[in-house]
Amino acid sequence: MSVDRSTIWPYRDGEPGRFYYQRYSHPTGVEAERRLGELDGGHALLFSSGAGATTALVLTLLSPGDTIALAEGAYFGTGVLFEELEHWGLRHVEFDQTGTPPDGVQLVWLEAPSNPFLTMPDLEAAASHPARVVVDATAATPVHLRPLEHGADFVLHSATKYLAGHDDALLGAVVCRHEEDAELLKDFRTRSGIVAGPDACFLLLRGLKTLELRVRRQTDSAIEIARRLGDHPQVQKVRYAGIGGLLSFDVAGAEEARKVETSLRLIRNATSLGGVDSVLEARSRWEGDRVPPGLLRLSVGLEPVEELWADLDQALKKSLISRARE
Ligand SMILES: *Cc1c(COP(=O)(O)O)cnc(C)c1O
């Protein structure tokens, strides 16, 4: 399919057709939503970013005075956004998503697996909670997890990451179990203008063609790298959920982490995750005390696993030399 960048489509005999103004919907977006809806088994809607999708979802579902139970250790930006929304009367509490969500909340927000702590939620415990359940499955992708089949009401994706997959499109998605929810959310999206443009939707469609191949290969490489990191003398702890290409590990401290970051040759020292190129960064630069100072988050790309390992190993060895000189 080619990209139709029109913002308007002429009426026929004075009547608007299927498409009339891009903010409501456009052909490339509808096609990308159809494909993603199939992958997750629900009704998909695209937004201008993952954070935009989160904003639209909570403002559509909740009212001032409502409380969200947010998985502890979930994506930092989600907690920061919920704090921002406290001005408008939305509250949130954190809880351990490997257990049961707290009572008295109107929405349960899980992350599978959490970024950067890599815990997996207890989906069964959440599904039996009276509140509706959102699973941010950005890191799992539909290749490894279809949360709607486990009782979730909504799946959220930062499609910027694995779904688009090439670090060149900013996009978010919500996949709804119920069509009525999708309609409400779509109305809010149209009114608020938190919409995804045709070019980004086209890049998503292209990315989805190779999603399964990419994610299976990244998972195979991540399993191997997590195993080797676990045996590495400079590594204190490895976190990996067993699925997907995302993992995190700890070196001794902030200085060692910086040395690893600046010694890498193949793996890029950059933020984000889910692209075909591997990236690594110390998360404390963004998350402060919430993470150990030596925590490095690695998104495993498509490079040969032996080349990735050789790069990590040489960078880890340099981090040891730096401490010995002190
Ligand atoms: C990146 C990310 C987001 C935010 O998505 P953007 O596309 O950057 O707005 C949300 N959740 C998770 C788990 C993420 O990794």
Image (spheres, rainbow, N blue to C red):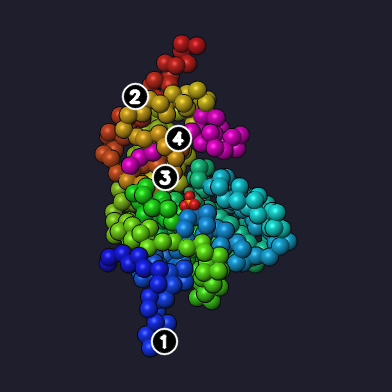
Q: Where is residue 45 drawn, in percent x and y?
A: 46, 66
Write down the residue under mark 2: 314
**11 or 140: nearer the eye?**
11
Number of the front mark, 1 or 3: 1
Q: Where is residue 69 drawn, in percent x and y?
A: 64, 56
CA distance separating discs 1 and 2: 68 Å
User: CB atoms at circles 4 and 1 under 8 Å apart?
Assistant: no
If you read the primary sequence from the N terminus, does the residue marked by circle 4 or circle 1 appear first? 1
Q: Which quadrant is home to the N terminus?
A: bottom left
Q: Residue at x 52, y 64 (%)?
A: 193
If you read the primary sequence from the N terminus, does the residue marked by circle 3 or circle 2 appear first? 3
Write down the residue under mark 4: 281
CA distance separating discs 4 and 1: 55 Å
Based on the picture, tell me whether residue 153 belongs to the magenta stretch: no
Tell me where the magenta segment starts and ends, as one range: 277-295
| Three-letter amino acid code of the residue under disc 1 | Gly
Q: Quadrant of residue 163?
A: bottom left
Q: Residue at x 38, y 75 (%)?
A: 9
Label 2 crowding class (10 Å Cα cut-off): few <14, some 14-19, many 20+? Answer: some
| Three-letter amino acid code of the residue under disc 4 | Glu
CA distance separating discs 4 and 3: 10 Å
| Three-letter amino acid code of the residue under disc 3 | Leu
CA distance separating discs 4 and 2: 16 Å
Label 4 crowding class (10 Å Cα cut-off): few <14, some 14-19, many 20+? Answer: many
**149 or 277: nearer the eye?**
277
Write down the residue under mark 3: 273
Write down the residue under mark 1: 14
